[in-house]
Image (cartoon, grey):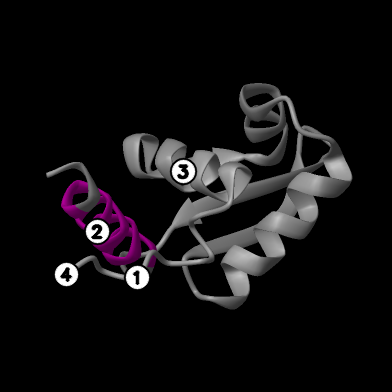
Amino acid sequence: MFKKLNPLLHSQLRLAIISYLVANGKSDFNELKNITKATSGNISVQLKKLEKAKYITIVKGFLNNYQHTSIAITNTGIDAFEEYVNAIKQYLK
């Protein structure tokens, strides 16, 4: 029987963000924007959804007198990603 895919991670942009964070642990807003080629508004909306689900943490502050947004994956986010990957594997068998 096929497992239900996590609808939060089934979005292409959110999956790209989480995948990048799984590989790197953390990132910042501009780096994610450059890697995904998404608009600032779209990235912001998707990050808020991931933060609400406790998949990531967002810390806003300043770096060299400029606004800086740091994003890190949580253990909950890692677990959700692993479950998603395992569910996809079931479809490929």
- How much space separates mark 2 and mark 3, taking CA atoms? 24 Å
Query: Comparing marks 3 and 4, which lies closer to the viewer?
Result: 4
Query: Comparing marks 1 and 4, which lies closer to the viewer?
Result: 4
Q: Which mark is residue 45?
A: none
Q: Is residue 19 above or below residue 83?
A: above
Image location (x, y in percent) of residue 90: 17, 54
Tell me the residue that label 4 is attached to: 1
Which of marks 4 and 3 precedes in the sequence? 4
Q: Quadrant of the C terminus?
A: top left
Looking at the image, residue 31 sits to the left or right of residue 84; the answer is right
Q: Secondary structure at mark 2?
A: helix
Q: Which mark is residue 4?
A: 1
Image location (x, y in percent) of residue 83: 25, 63
Tell me the residue that label 3 is attached to: 26
Image location (x, y in percent) of residue 91: 23, 50
Say whether marks 1 and 4 touch (CB < 8 Å).
no
Q: Secondary structure at mark 3?
A: strand
Q: Quadrant of the N terminus?
A: bottom left
Mark 4: which amino acid?
Answer: Met
Bounds of the magenta span?
77-90
Q: Is residue 53 above or below residue 21?
A: below
Image location (x, y in percent) of residue 5: 38, 64
